[in-house]
Amino acid sequence: MADLAEPVTGVLLVGGASRRFGSPKALAELDGEPLAVRVHRTLAEAFPHVVAVGKTADRLGLPFPVEDDGSELRAALVGLVAGLRLATTELAVVVPTDVPFVTAGYLRGLAAAARGATVAHPESGPLPGAYRRAALPVLERRLAAGELALRDAAAELDARVVPGDPELLRNVNTPADLP
């Protein structure tokens, strides 16, 4: 594991609605491994501390604890806010469970790119992304106002765009998106 300039918490988001997928994406399998387990493993390869955030009421039965995000809403912004609150570090790299192709190297690159910025994310959007706790006031304000679009929230922050291979950043939105 490459040394980073500062400690980083990996945050896995597992609380999505999975409307287009039809069942919990966290439990969908890729190469015999649930997506959430795969992404959690990748985060653990990149960072010494990982926290998973979602809805404990979903009872996903994952092999690691899932911290409740404290909201009835299902939105990435909810998980991001909860993850930043739970992070043990100033910087957190946040990855949704539906980005199973991302690598530990790319995630460490996001963390490194966040040096001197509030957020670092790929050109494809705000997740996965490296977020500083300093982003919480903006994110919490937008959440309280019901403004749940994470892309709009990220646009309001000092963000750095990090190039990345589109195949590594590909989302799994339907079962057909799995190889």
Image (cartoon, rainbow, N blue to C red):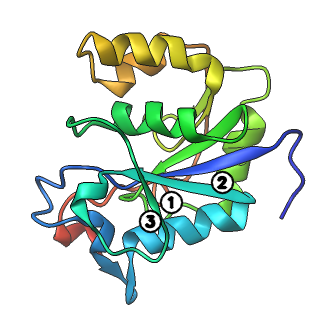
Residue under the point 86% across and 58% down: 2
Q: How far apart are marks 1 and 3 (CA)?
A: 8 Å
Callout 1 touching callout 2 (CB < 8 Å)? yes
Q: Give the residue at mark 1.
A: 168
Residue 112 sits in quarter? top right
Residue 129 lies in what quarter of the image?
A: top right
Q: Residue at left 53%, top 60%?
A: 102
Residue at which label 3 appears:
100
Task: Give the quarter of the figure containing the C terminus.
Answer: bottom left
Residue occupying the point 35% across, 13% down: 142
Q: What's the residue at 50%, 65% (across, down)?
A: 39
Q: Residue 49 in the image: x percent, y percent? A: 69, 56
- Above-or-below relation of 88 to 131: below
x, y percent for residue 44: 66, 65
Mark 1 residue crowding within 10 angstroms, few (<14) / some (14–19) / many (20+): few
Query: What kind of element bears circle 1?
Result: loop
Q: How crowded is mark 3: few (under 14 residues within 10 Å), some or many (20 or more)?
A: many
Specify the label residue 128 is tagged with: none
Residue picked out by circle 2:
106
Q: Horizontal placement of 40 versus 9: left or right?
A: left
Q: Can residue 124 be seen in this view?
A: no
Nearer-N-terminus badge (1/3): 3
Residue 42 vertical position relative to residue 163 in the rendered view, above or below: below
For discs 1 and 3, the disc positioned in front in the rendered view? 3
Asked which secondary structure carries label 2, the reply is helix
Q: What residue type is labelled 1?
A: Leu
Amino acid type at circle 3 is Pro
Quadrant that contains the N terminus = bottom right
Give the structural element (helix, strand or loop) at label 3: loop
In the image, taking residue 133 as reference, residue 15 lies left or right, namely left
Q: Position of residue 158 (x, y in %)?
A: 61, 13
Mark 1 to mark 2 CA distance (whole Å) = 9 Å
